[in-house]
Image (cartoon, helix red, strand yellow):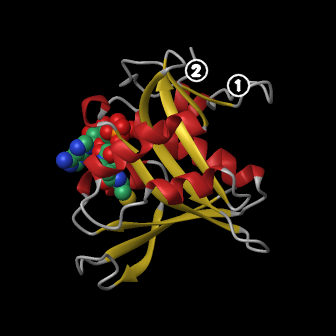
Amino acid sequence: MPRVSLSSPGSSPPYTAPESIRMRPPPVTVPVRVRRAEVSDLDDLVALEESSFAHDRLSRAQYRRHLDSESAQVLVASANHRRFLGTAVVFFRRGSKVARLYSLATKPEARGKGVGSALIEAAEIAARAHRCRSLRLEVRTDNVAAIGIYERLGYTRIGTYPKYYQDGADALRFEKLFA
Ligand SMILES: CC(C)(COP(=O)(O)OP(=O)(O)OC[C@H]1O[C@@H](n2cnc3c(N)ncnc32)[C@H](O)[C@@H]1OP(=O)(O)O)[C@@H](O)C(=O)NCCC(=O)NCCS
């Protein structure tokens, strides 16, 4: 079974992970499906935001706006087509070939099962579909779990933003160039 599918109701066929991903030893205990977020996901999105981030949170109103925006994609990972597991938010800028992974979070009880990786892979698919050449992101310098995933998935460190976060923490900048 493919590890990740990216789908929206009635549109393109499910995404099948490339051979390199499918051949990796399987850490996943739940099949993960990734789709565009809908209004009915707002409660889960806001609850996860509050349980995952102490600062720099997206508000419910911001999530609501991003659902209808052409310059954003809010992705949702779920198990069995229903159970909400996590989210990723990708931003696009008109005229820019660089997409930005703005947010990534997995529900605490679902971490370590490949959900975050599946969301990143889906974010890359969304960026490619927008004809972007790369995906960039910022991450707190002390977020070892997230930094480990980005490095494993081929992201390269491209710089630092000192005092980037509301609490004064520095950010590392990462980028993945698409082939
Ligand atoms: C970062 C986050 C999204 C990862 O989600 P996830 O669903 O657990 O991700 P995956 O299961 O795909 O991968 C987890 C990886 O992190 C590793 N990991 C988990 N905790 C770790 C830790 N404390 N130190 C180092 N590595 C850690 C696991 O070993 C695994 O690596 P592997 O796939 O090479 O074995 C999740 O931890 C989270 O929501 N954190 C809070 C929000 C956050 O920090 N978001 C990122 C902002 S840039």
Along the viewing direction, whichever of 70 and 157 lies nearer the viewer: 70
Query: In the image, ligand 1 is in what quadrant?
Result: top left
**Disc 1 residue type (three-letter):** Pro
The C terminus, quarter of image: bottom right
- Disc number at residue 2? 2
Vertical comparison of 159 with 36: above or below = below
Q: Quadrant of the N terminus?
A: top right
- Mark before the other along the chain sequence, 1 or 2: 2
Residue lying at 67% horizontally and 64% vertically, measured from the top left: 92
> In x, y percent, where is residue 123?
59, 48
Pick whichever, 78 or 5, lies toward us.
78
Residue 141 in which image quadrant:
bottom left
Q: Is residue 123 above or below residue 91?
A: above
Q: Secondary structure at mark 1?
A: loop
Is 47 rendered above or below residue 135? above
**Going by the image, does 6 lie left or right of 114?**
right
In the image, residue 145 above or below residue 9: below
Name of the residue lying farthest toward the front: 61
* Residue 93 visible in image: yes
Residue 135, percent across and down? 59, 61
Residue at x-position 80% and y-position 29%: 11
Crowdedness near tag 2: few (<14), some (14–19) or many (≥20) residues, C-alpha within 10 Å: some
* Marks 1 and 2, how far apart at CA: 9 Å
How many tags in the picture?
2
Residue wearing tag 1: 14
